[in-house]
Structures are given as structure tokens and as C-alpha cells.
Image (spheres, rainbow, N blue to C red):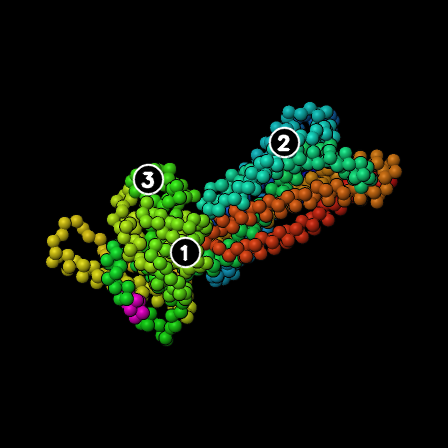
Amino acid sequence: MKSMFYPKLAWMGIRKNSRLYVPYILASMGMVMMYYIVAFLNTSSALQSVPGGEVMQSMLGFGMFVIVAFSLLFLFYTNSFLNRRRKKEYGLYNILGMGKWNLAKILVCESLMSAAISMGGGLLTGITFSKFAELGMVNLLMGETEFSFSLGAEAILETFKWFSIIFLLILLQTLWQIRGASAMELLRSENAGEKPPKANWLLALAGLVILAAAYYLAVSIENPIEALLWFFVAVIMVIIATYLLFIAGSVTICRILQKNKSYYYKTSHFVSISSMVYRMKRNGAGLASICILCTMVLVMLSGTVCLYAGTEDSLRSRYPRDIMIDSSFRDIEAMESGVTDQVKESAGKAVRAEADRTLTAENVMDYSIAEFSCIMEDGQFRTYDETTPASQKNDYANMWQIAFVPLEDYNQMMNQKETLAPGEALIYTTKRDYEKDTIVINGGEVIRVKKVVPEFIHSGIDGEQLISFMYIFVPNLVEAARPLEGHVNEWGNPVLGLHWYYGVDLDCGDEMQMRIQEKVQAALEHEMMRMKADQDALDSTEETSGEEETSPFLAYSRCAAEERATFYGLYGSLFFLGILLGVVFVFAAVLIIYYKQISEGYEDQARFEIMQKVGMTETDIRRSVNSQVLTVFFLPLIMAGIHLAFAFPMVHKLLLLFSLTNLNLLLGVTVCCYLIFAVFYMLVYRITSKGYYHIVSVWAEKK
């Protein structure tokens, strides 16, 4: 009987404080469920068998780490609300004769019970929904699988291990707080409010300055590489500024409202504003946390949803045609030898041999380029060599990939009739604009930019690179490229890359496209062997230096259908993680809001009781509650919207690194995400305000 004394007290404490414990246990169950589902998918054999599944599982490993880290921080945070309300109860036990060791036994029992319910319920719901999540992931990858129930033993063990550690750490923190507090401190902890802080104009101003700097950073960066490098710096600045503004700035705003007599001395505002000032330090930190979580959800969802919705756009940025051939040449003479006609003929024979019907080759892409990497220095471009400083080799902001393209090929590809005088050129840039009207490379002749053309069908290489790309359309490719021939980099390799790109769209399914690509690749290899044999025969009749000659011609084919699974695996996993982590963060924000309102409701109960005794009606109480909740509740949502608006340009630059250039898609997705989230936020407001009102007016119901 004695052995059940402490478990009974623990269970009674949980049951009597169900208003606080139930949301905490539900949150814990949700975290356990999310982690199990991700861990299960990370080892799912069904995903491994689907094309693109391995890519998706590698991304899920990152999601497991994020969920564990966030669960640790979030459950510690929410557990602090429980401790604050329960300390009075622990102090009473202490006064009635229980020592700290007896209290520790109760806390251990409570922790074991809540952990058992959380992990048991979380694993049960996770196992229930894991198969549906697996089917959803397979559908994202456009694959097929059978519905069969299965348990992830490894996922269960991983979930149990990590969350046991988390609950143990939470228990140790609670025991440490009880150990260092006296009985009177525990009794008074619930009523130990914070002194009304003074309006700190310096911290509020610092928050505004830091936030303005972060916003300027977000909207002023033009290069996607710079956006990637500065993104996390801007995020940290926004987080710091948000906390400063909500803590110090909100106090300042409340003081300003108090000085406004026409606003402050109203029954609907007086109690709410005075209560907010009294505990604004803790209130501001909670609101800042809600704002940051809301911003994280909105940025993550808008980015990942846009990526998945624009998967085909990204795929076509990398593979603009169904079948593509990339041919590279040792020198300009090899490019001018006419081998491209032979390659087109061999590829055409391979297509006709594989297809059981006549296929229509549409949207033919056919052009030559001479490309090279360079650095912009003092308004001019300079290729890399052994004298280039190491600092410039990593200066992504000033790096450019430049390609000369014959004007004839541009006109044929884009159905234009442009003309150029000697020394003139047309240009097309990606990822950022080129503002100057002249181009100088390695101190050579000045090229005048006649016009910036609005579009060009690039080969897909630009989509694989992070640096900006510039196409320069010139009257004569050989004349433009000749000054760079013979230049080598620090490793002795030519800086000039000579390529011929050829591609077509085919009116057939993905499987046939992949079979055709295999035949085309075989034809290319045969053509390369033939040319190598011809070159060897030619070399044997001439005097050579004894050095091994490189092949004059190399070519390989690519197929968009073959890479589609990889793209959907990557973007599908990001989309799934975005949804999953978005749900986790939303759940966290809702729970913080709930606990904030519940804890403040208990604190305000006595104040509203006094105000009602001096004449405040229930209608006045409801108006005051609405005033307080509306004043602070929608502030994080509004601030998150402002953060999202200023983050939009940087998010757009980051998505360019994923070859997603559809600005209208990103804008539409972002607006829809914010509107849907705002509707959900308003529903939470209605539920929260009712709970708060019920607490502050419960004394009147008892009378």
C-alpha cells in the first residue's frame, strides 16, 4: 500500500491539473509521432525501391536531427509553464512534512507517467499513420507500392532512445529547481510577478536598427551566392531584433498608450494595458517566440511548396530538352571540322532504330559556345590563372561564367533577325543583371553591348552552377574565342571550354525516351572511337612530340526522364519535411499561445475579481479580455507577415540556386500560405480567448 502512495499522488496531481498537463502530453505525443514517422520513412524498403527514394531518405536524416533538437528546446520551454503552476502545490507538500526527497519521488512518478503516456501514445499514432505517410511519399515520387502494414523496429528503438533522454533531462531540470527552493519560495512562486519594467528606449532603438539592417540585407542582395552566404546572418539578426522589439519595444509602446488618456482610461483597455506592462518582459519573450515560429513556418512552407510545385520548371532549367547531347572539343579546329553533322546523323539513326513508329523531333536546340570562368575586377573580366589570389578564387559575388555564342545560332534558335557591327554584341544574363554597356576580357578589345536580350534557351549547365552566367552573342565565334585559346589555369588546364549542344523533344513516354537515350549514347561512343582511330592513324604518319594527345572530340547524352525521379526525390522530400516541420512549429506556437493565455488567466483572475467588485461588469471583462488578447495576439502574426515580405527577395534568390525562376509561382504560393495560416491563427485566437475569459470570470460563476 505504501509503495503506491507516491504514484497515487502523482496521478492525482496530473488529473487535477489536466488543463495544463493534457496539452503538454499531447504536444509530447505529437513530437514522438513526428519523429517516429520520419525515422520509419528513413529506413522504409518501399521508398528505397522507388526511383528518387534514396535522395529523399538522405534528406529525411536531416529532418530527424531537426525534430530531436526542436523537441528538446520546445518541451523544456513548455515544461516551465507546468513547473510554475505546480510549485505552489509542491510548497504545500513541503510544509505538510514532505522533504525534498519525497517531492522528488512524486516528480519521478509524474515524469514516468507523462513520458509513458507520451511515448506510448506517440508511437501508437506514429505506427498508425506511418504507412499513410509512406504512401504519400511514394506518390510524391510518382511511384507505386502496395499497402501492407509493417512495424519499424529500428525506428521504434531510435524514438524510444532519444525521447527517453529528453524526458530524463526535463526531469533533472525540475528536480534541480525544487532542490534549490525553500517551502515559502515555492508557495509564493505563482504570485511572484515581475516588477513593471521601465521603457528602455535604447534597447528598442537597437532592435529597430538591427531589424532595419537585416531588412536592407535581404532586399539589397542581388547575387544568389551572396544570399546563400548571408541568409543565416540575416535570420539571426531578425531573431535578435524581434526579441528586443517585443520585450523592450512593447514596454515602450505600452507606456505610450498609458500616456494617451483617451485610450488608456477605458474599461476595455485599462486592465489589459496595466496587466501587460506588469509582466511585459516574460510576455514579450513569449510573443517573440510565437512570431519567430510563425515566420519559420511561413518561409519554410512557401519555399518548399513552391519548390515541389515548380519541380518540372527546375527540371527543365537543367534539362531543357528530352534528349540532349553535349559535345566538347580539344581546340577550335576540331569544332570546325564538321563532326557535329556526323553526330546528328548518328543520333537520328539511333532514334529511328529504337522507335516503333516515326517520332517527331520538336523544339530543336542546336548551337555552339566557347565558355570560360572569370572574375570581375575593376569593371573588367579576368580569367583565372596561377597568379590569381586565393581570395578571388572564393569571391563568389564577383564570379562569372561567360559563353560566346554565334549570332547566327541565336537568330536560328530564337527566331530573330538581329544584326551586329564589328565590336558589338548582344548579351543575356542569369541570376543577376550586368549593368555596364561594355565588356573587356583580360584587357583585350572593348566589346560594346548593343542590347540585352530577354531570353535564351540555355543548355542546362547554368542550372547546375551557383555563379552568374552571361551569354555573349557575337558575329564570329572563332574570332571572339581565339584570344583566349592557349590560356591555362593554375593546374595547366585550358580556361576555354568549346562545346556544341544539341537537343530535341520527343513525342513519346519516359521509358522510351530512356531507351532512346541509351541508343544515342552508344552511337556517340561509336563515333568517338571512330574519330579516335582516325586521329591515331593521322598521328602515326606525322612527327609527334612523344606526348600523349587528348581526344579531339568527346560527347555524352542526357535524358530529362532519367533525372525526373531524382528531382522529385529531392524536392518531394523538402516538401514533405516542410509540411512536417511546419506542423511541428505550428503546434509549438499554438501551445505557447495556449500556455501563455492560461498562465496569465490565472494571474489576472484576482485582478478582475477586484475590478468586478468595484463595478466592472461581465461585459466589461469580456471587452477587456478581447482588448488584451487582440493587442498582443495578432502582433506576432502581423510582424511575421512583415518579416516574410522582406524575406521574399532573399528566398527568391535562394530558389534560383535550385533552378527555380518562376517568380509568379513563388509570389502566389507565399500569399496563399500567409492567408491560410492567418485563418488558422484566427481560429486559435477564438479558442484561446474563450479559455482565458473562462478562467478570469470563473469566480463569478461560483457566486
Residue at mark 2 to residue at mark 1: CA–CA distance: 52 Å
Give the residue type that dot 2 points to: Leu
Give the residue type that dot 1 points to: Lys
Report the mark closest to the observer, 2 or 1.
1
As helix, strand or loop, the secondary structure at mark 2 comes to helix
For the residues bearing labels 3 and 2, Cβ distance under 8 angstroms:
no
Give the residue type that dot 3 points to: Thr
Q: Which mark is residue 203?
A: 2
Percent coordinates x, y for residue 480 in the rendering: 31, 54
Quadrant where the image shows the N terminus: top right
Total residue callouts = 3
Q: Which residue is mark 3?
A: 388
Which residue is outermost to the bottom? 357
Q: Earlier in the sequence, mark 2 or mark 1?
A: 2
Q: Is residue 501 above or below residue 488?
A: below
25 on left or right of 500: right
Q: Is residue 550 above or below residue 229?
A: below
Would you call the spot at circle 1 few (<14 residues within 10 Å), some (14-19), or many (20 or more)?
some
